[in-house]
Amino acid sequence: MDTILEIKNFSIEFETPEGQVLAVSNMNVALKKGQSLGVVGESGSGKTQTFLALMGLLAKNGRCSGQASFYGHDLLQMSVEQLNQIRGVKMSMIFQDPMTSLNPYLRVSRQMTEVLIEHKNYNKKDALEKAIHMLDLVGIPDPSRRIHMYSHEFSGGMRQRVMIAMALLCEPDLLIADEPTTALDVTIQAQILELLDELKQKLGMSIVIITHDLGVVAGLCDQVMVMYGGRVAEHGDVQQIFYHPQHPYTQGLLQSMPSLVSELDQALYSIPGHPPNLQSLPAGCAFNPRCAKCIDACSQTQPELLAVASGTMVACHHVHTPHVAENLS
Ligand SMILES: Nc1ncnc2c1ncn2[C@@H]1O[C@H](COP(=O)(O)OP(=O)(O)OP(=O)(O)O)[C@@H](O)[C@H]1O
């Protein structure tokens, strides 16, 4: 299988009035064609910025280093013109807020057909037909009429579907979906996730799904990367991590999953404390102040991301210190 995306030693730093902020530190991940990756973690853990940077959309005060190869070509070294040949065509992103990628002043028909005319050499008639087909595929009722509406005339859920249709229009090889369902009610959430899974099978595309919710990645993803305070805490096969989570943070996320525990018990299982402030990360492992399995090393040195027997990569002193783990667990 071809490797579609390979991120190596990737970091992001922001320059702020208070000094430099390391938002993402030394990330490594490879995704094969047709595979999907779930990126999970609490707010501010670096999920969105990583993939915005890959799309060439990092804020002006941000700087990234390392490599991010798309089919072997480093996205971080590409000019805007080179990126424009790929963005929205071979690699698409669904943003948290649909209005980010929909132009309120243009009818949806115009926005959708222009992409096909410009990047896929469609004529106007075929482009309109294809766009209507895509709206139909994402479950927009009466698409040949609604395609002529403006984005604000759609409900929130419909707008999200329009954005997904736009992102899929050129049948990208890689779809990056940032919290694609958070703003939607539960039934529509389920429908959209089902749709993404269907399109993954049908079009063979790779998906990166960014979410707070491990439940979302369960059905859709092959691998999962758990981020904490800008660092990868655990990364590997979804089944392995779901059934045998190693990092105490992953264990906490899994225990507080709504499908596993009742609403009342969620409070009991939820991870104590708050996500860390990147400007004042604790020494050692950033999770140590909230971790019940903390040992001395955790507040002293940052744990390396190392493989455990199952092949999962884990950054945790407790996990990699067997005699201590045996005594404490
Ligand atoms: N332009 C910026 N300048 C300084 N810091 C920034 C900037 N943009 C983002 N950050 C910081 O980078 C960190 C990572 O942000 P990111 O949006 O990737 O988090 P996230 O995990 O996607 O969170 P959420 O789930 O809330 O979207 C955050 O702490 C954020 O405050």
Image: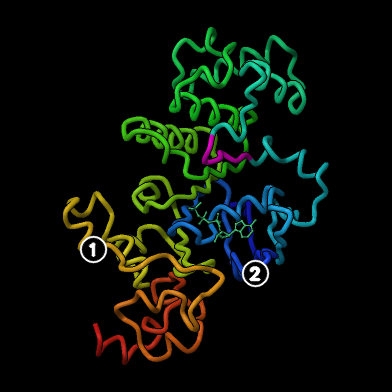
The residue that disc 2 covers is 18
Residue, x 25% and y 90% (percent of image)?
327
Indicate yes or no whether the magenta region holds residue 96: yes
Q: Which mark is residue 303?
A: none
Ligand 1 position by quadrant: bottom right
Counting labels gives: 2
Side of 174 relative to 277 (left or right): right
**Number of other residues with Cα within 10 Å of mark 1, as a class: few under 14, some 14 to 19, many 20 or more:** some
Earlier residue among tags 1 and 2 = 2
Among the 4 quarters of the image, the one containing residue 67: bottom right
Q: Is residue 85 above or below residue 15?
A: above
The residue that disc 1 covers is 269
**In the depicted view, which residue is nearer to us: 257 or 126?**
257
Which percent across, then down, holds residue 240?
36, 63
The amino acid pointed to by label 2 is Glu
Q: Is residue 255 above or below residue 171?
A: below
Which percent across, then down, holds residue 96?
52, 41
Side of 106 relative to 287 (left or right): right
As helix, strand or loop, the secondary structure at mark 2 comes to loop
Which percent across, then down, holds residue 27?
59, 67
Ligand 1 is within 8 Å of the C-beta of the residue at disc 1: no
The amino acid pointed to by label 1 is Tyr
**Number of other residues with Cα within 10 Å of mark 2, as a class: few under 14, some 14 to 19, many 20 or more:** few
If the image is split into quadrants, where does the C terminus sit? Answer: bottom left
Disc 1 and disc 2: Cα gap in Å?
35 Å
As helix, strand or loop, the secondary structure at mark 1 comes to helix
Which residues, given as a range, are shown in magenta? 92-97
Residue, x 47% and y 39% (percent of image)?
180
Contact flag, marks 1 and 2 (Cβ < 8 Å): no
**In the depicted view, which residue is nearer to us: 120 or 230?**
230
Which percent across, then down, holds residue 243?
29, 62
